[in-house]
Image: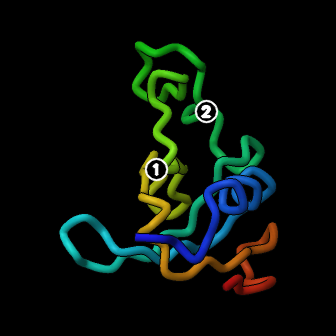
Amino acid sequence: MKSKYKREDIALILSQGAATIEFTKVDGSQRVMRCTISSHLIPEEYLPNHSYNSQYSYSDLDYNPNVIRVFDLGLNEWRSFRVTSVTELTVLDDRGYVTKPLG
C-alpha cells in the first residue's frame, strides 16, 4: 500500500515539532496520536541515550524504513506506526494548536 505521505516528510515535521498523526493500526482499528521526535518536546527521562540496551534506545539496529518511532505526547511513551498506515497528519504549534493540516 502506498502512503499519501513520504517517510522523510513525516520525520522532518516531527523532528521540528509536534503533529497529530491519524493511522490504521495492524488490527484494523484507527488511532490518533499527538507525537514528536523533537528532543526539546520530549521529557529528559525519556530521551534516547543511543545505547541499544536501554528501554528507550534508538539505534541503527532499530531502523525500519517502513516504520517511524515517535514519542506519544499524550501517553508519555514511545510508540511506532507504519508510514503506509497514516491517513492524516496535522502540524501543531508549540502550544499544541493546529497550524496546518497536510494532505
- Quadrant where the C terminus sits is bottom right
Q: Is residue 58 left or right of residue 9?
A: left
15, above or below 58, in the image:
below
Q: Based on the displayed image, in which of its 4 quarters is residue 89 positioned? A: bottom right
Closer to us: mark 2 or mark 1?
Answer: 1
Instruction: Identify the residue at image location x=49%, y=61%.
Output: 83
Instruction: Identify the residue at image location x=71%, y=82%.
Output: 102
* Residue 23 in picture, x, y percent from top left: 42, 74
- SS assignment at label 1: strand
Q: N-terminal of the two: label 2 or label 1? A: 2
Q: Based on the displayed image, in which of its 4 quarters is residue 39 positioned? A: top right
Mark 2 lies on residue:
47
Amino acid at the residue labelled 1: Val
* Residue 74 in picture, x, y percent from top left: 50, 64
Mark 1 lies on residue:
67
- Quadrant where the N terminus sits is bottom left
